[in-house]
Amino acid sequence: MLDFIGVGLGPFNLSLASLLHQKSDLDYLFFEKKAQFDWHAGMQLPHTVLQVPFMADLVSMVDPTSPFSFLNYLKAQQRLYKFYFLEQTHIPRREYNHYCQWVADQIEQIEYLSTVTSIQPVENGFAVSVIQDGTENQYLCRNLVLGVGNIPYLPKCLQSLMKAHPERCIHSSQYLDDSHRALKGNVVVLGSGQSAAEVFLDLFDQQYDYDRQQNAQFNLHWLTRASGFFPMEYAPLGLEHFSPDYLRHFYQFDELNKDLQLGKQSLLYKGISAQTIHQIYQKLYHRSIGGQPSSTHLHSQANLIDATFTDLDQVKLVFQDRVTLKQFSIDADFVVSATGYHPPEFEFLKQLKTHIQTNAQGRWQISEDYRVVHDGVGEIFVQNMEMHTHGVGVPDLGLGAHRAATIANQLLGYTQYDLGNTAQCFQHFNPFQNPEVNAYQSKSISQLSMAQTNQAFQQVKNQQPHSKEIKHTTHPFFEKSRI
C-alpha cells in the first residue's frame, strides 16, 4: 500500500513532489493524464511573463537551498549570467513552464498518461482506479493529495455553441492550440483579466499587414461585463494579502465574512498587470497617429446575454449595457472567451462524496492544514480547492510552496520544513498580532465593560504609533477581530 497518491500534476502538486524528493522513505505516486508537465500550454504566448517574482518557484519560499530552485535551474541551463543581466524578477511564462518540466523530469514518482477514474474508501485508506495504456489498474494508498486544478469557464450561452462550432468560438486556454484559424470580419475577445489582455495584444498585432499598408484584416472587439479594464493590485501592502500571515487571519473568519471579504478583493487577483495595460495603450496611441480609422473597439459594462449561430456562419452575440440597459449585438466571425476557470465536478470522487462534510453552501469543509473533513480512514489533502476557506492567496504561486510544505510535514509525520508562526508582514491584519494587545488576550473581552475595553485599547494606542490608524475602539470591534 502506498503512503499517498497525488492526483494531477500542476505546479502545486509538483511543488509537493519536489519538497519530498529524497527526503524520506515514503512510498508514493503522482498520476497525470497528460503526456508531460505542460502548464497552460494554450496561453504560452511569446513575451508574456509571470505575474509573480521568480522566488515564487516550486520550493524557494520554504527551502531556498533546494536543488529544485529556479536559480539552480538557471545554473543547470547555463543561463545565470543571462538572467543576471536581464535585471527582471518576473520571468517569461514559457521559461517557468520549462523550469517545471526540468524539475518533473528528475522525479521518478510521476506517472504520465494516467487518468484517475474512481476513488473509493477501503479498510485502511483508498482504492484508486487509473486508466494507463488502455488498461484499468488499481492502487491502494493511505492518503490522497488532490491537485487537479480548475477547468475553463464559459458563459452559459456559449457552452453548447463552442461544442458545435469550435472553429468559431474557443476558450482562451485553447488559444495557441487553435493558432491556424482564419481571422476575418469581426473578432471578439471577452473578459477583463490578464488572459483577455494578452489575447487582445496578440490579435492586435495581427490586424494589419504593415509591409503592404493595407486596411485592417479584421475588426477587433474587446468587451467585458466588468466596470472597466482595471489593473491588478500590485503595491507591496496589497501583496501582503498573499502571505501566511493573512492566510491564518482569514481562516478564522466565519463563512459569511469570508465570502464578503473575497467579494471585495477581486482586483488582488483578477485584474490586468499595469505593464500589459501600458503596452495596450501605447499600441492604441501609435496606431491612432494621423487620424487613422480605428478597427479596434473596447467596451466595458457589456453583459453577454445571448449567443446564436447564424445562417451566415457567424456567432451573433447580444449584449446589454449594464448602465444604460440598452442592448446591442455583434456578428462575430471568431470569439475568444477569456472568462476564467472554475472548479470541476469530481466524478472520480463520487463514491467518497457522501463521506465528505460540507458547509451550508455545499462546499467542502477544509481544515487550516488543508485536510478535507470526512468520516473515513486516511487523509484527503487539497491544493487550490480551498479559496472559500483560506482566502485570496490560494491560487497564487507565491504561497504554493508554503502549502505544499504544510502537507509534506503531515505526510512525513514530522517537521521537515519549519514554517513557523512569526509574522512576516508589516501590517497587522488582526490587532491581536500586536504584542501589546496580546497582553489582553488572556482576559475574556466579553467580560470587560465597554469602558474598560476602550481604556485598555487607548493605552496601547498611545504607546504604538501605527495604532492611530485604528479608529473603532468599541466592544464589537474586539469581538469581530477575534473571529
Image (spheres, rainbow, N blue to C red):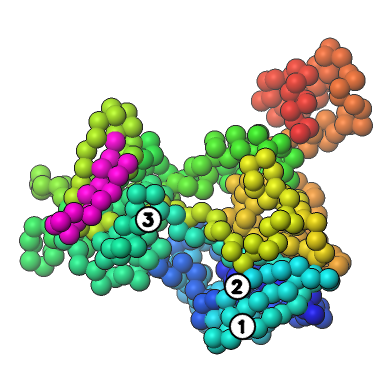
Magenta-highlighted stretch: main secondary structure? Answer: strand
Q: Secondary structure at mark 3?
A: helix
Q: CA distance from mark 1 to mark 3?
A: 31 Å
Instruction: Measuring from the top left, give residue 114's x and y in whole percent.
Output: 58, 79
Mark sitting earlier along the chain (2/3):
2
Mark 2 Cα shell of 10 Å, populated few (<14), some (14-19), many (≥20)? some
Q: Which residue bears the numbered disc 1?
A: 136
User: What span is colored magenta in the figure?
Assistant: 305-320
> Disc 3 residue type?
Gln
- Identify which amino acid the numbered label 1 is placed on: Glu
Q: Are marks 2 and 1 in contact (CB under 8 Å)?
A: yes
What percent of the width, then of the height, locates residue 477?
Answer: 74, 23
Q: Disc 3 marks which residue?
A: 159
Q: Distance from label 2 to label 3 (Cα)? A: 24 Å
Is residue 284 in sight in this rendering? Answer: no
Image quarter in which the N terminus is found: bottom right
State how far apart marks 2 and 1 are (Cα).
Answer: 9 Å
The residue positioned 86% from the left and 22% from the top of the image is: 446
Residue drawn at x 32%, y 43% is 304
Residue on which disc 2 sits: 117
Residue 121 visible in this rendered orientation of the protein: yes
